[in-house]
Image: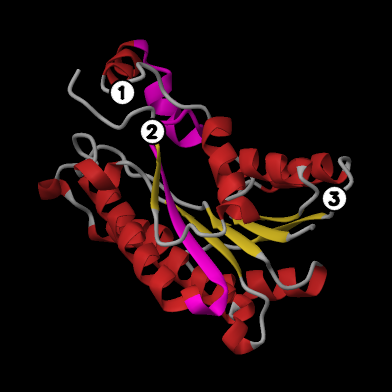
Amino acid sequence: MSKIVLITGGASGIGAATARLLAGHGHDIAINYRTRERQARSLAEELEERGVRAITVQADVAQPADIERLYREVDERLGAVDAVVNSAGIGAGPTRVDEADAEALERLFRTNVLGVILSSREAVRRMSTARGGKGGVIINISSMAATIGGRPGASFYAASKGAVDAFTVGLAKEVAREGIRAVSVRPGFTLTEMTTTYATDPKLLEYIASTIPMGRPGLVEEVARPIVWLLSDEASFITGSLFDVSGGGFRLG
């Protein structure tokens, strides 16, 4: 059965790869973006050529009013969401705690944590059977950084993803009897636009690969495939889980 799926941060990276795979299963897609309008529109056109409905909606998930508007637009243009993939997120350059900038930290946590929570709030309001909904699935994109405190200089980013994990587990318990499943997907180091700085430095990339048991970074499609499965009825008894897609996790090089 076709579903309506909202993907925040869906114009690129893991979000875009997930959109393409979901379209292959016949699902209608709402692609949220903040600044990548051209990429979002191009992706929507590509998905429509596959015979599904696809729309783009600009919204900054760090802004509560934008999140509310995002969901209203999806309601009006596609219908109430059946599933949400909260993929929008930002990183932070390597920074020690004694060099922390409060404004940058606020932006990081408003995007990576508050954005996920408020997007999930809007999803629950539409999905919950206690509110007249049909149930649904919420996938929150976290990171393996949450398990190790991040690589050197990435403790703030790791903390934001640790918050996503804790929130997802609590959310799942709250809404399990209202037909909603919630899962946190934790990719390991994956080649995306966000990791371009690392990927273009051969020595740094070689070092990072040495810390991954499988010996290489992940590809966005390798993260998208389990997300698509988790959204399906085949995963109907999975909720509150922290789902690692990491090539084996992390080890010392």
Percent from the top left, x then y, of residue 122?
A: 56, 76
Q: Earlier in the sequence, mark 2 or mark 1?
A: 1
Span highlighted in magenta in the image? 177-202
SS for tag 2? loop
Is 237 a magenta residue? no
**Residue 232 visible at all:** no
Q: Earlier in the sequence, mark 1 or mark 3?
A: 3
Residue under the point 46% across and 57% down: 183
Residue tagged by mark 1?
212
Is 194 a magenta residue? yes
Q: Residues within 10 Å of mark 3 (few under 14, many from 20)?
A: some
SS for tag 1? loop
Residue type at mark 2 is: Ser
- Which of these two is toward me, 43 or 133? 133
Which quadrant of the figure has residue 152? top left
Residue type at mark 3 is: Val
Q: CA distance from mark 1 to mark 3?
A: 37 Å
